[in-house]
Image: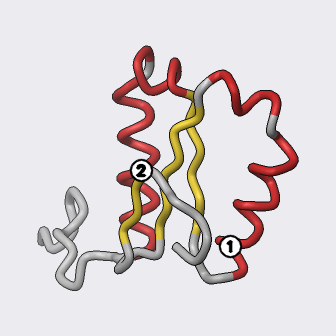
Amino acid sequence: MGHYIVDFVCLRARLVVELDGGHHAERLLEDFERTRDLARSGFRVLRFWNNEVLRETEAVLESILEALRQACPHPYPLPQAGEGEQ
């Protein structure tokens, strides 16, 4: 994307997911600038540490799913519990 290679992207949702290994702890400024540049291009960037993905997989997936829901709400959402009951 531009002059960046991203780990995962959903163009429709304008969402970038980056998985960071330990070497990223030494490149915080570069990662900040990269995230800022992608955000200026209209993308939301989610960053997760590799060990977070491995140890807290469900929480990471929930974060990604919520970001996708916010970016692309369902055109025909299901009714909430109790909604439509008389």
Q: Is residue 21 left or right of residue 15?
A: right
Where disc 2 sits, the SS reads: helix
- Residue to which mark 2 is pinned: 64
Q: Position of residue 49 (x, y in %)?
A: 58, 29
Q: Position of residue 85 (x, y in %)?
A: 13, 68
Q: Position of residue 81 (x, y in %)?
A: 21, 56
- Residue to which mark 1 is pinned: 39
Where disc 1 sits, the SS reads: helix
Q: Which of 33/76 is in front?
A: 33
Q: Which of 55/31 is in front?
A: 31
Quadrant the C terminus occupies: bottom left
Q: Is residue 67 left or right of residue 35?
A: left
The colour style of the image is secondary structure
For image coordinates 82% across by 40% down, the residue present is 28
| Quadrant in which residue 13 is drawn | bottom left
Q: Which of 56/32 is in front?
A: 32
**For the residue marked with disc 2, what is the amino acid?**
Ile
**For the residue marked with disc 1, what is the amino acid?**
Ala
Q: Position of residue 39 (x, y in %)?
A: 68, 73
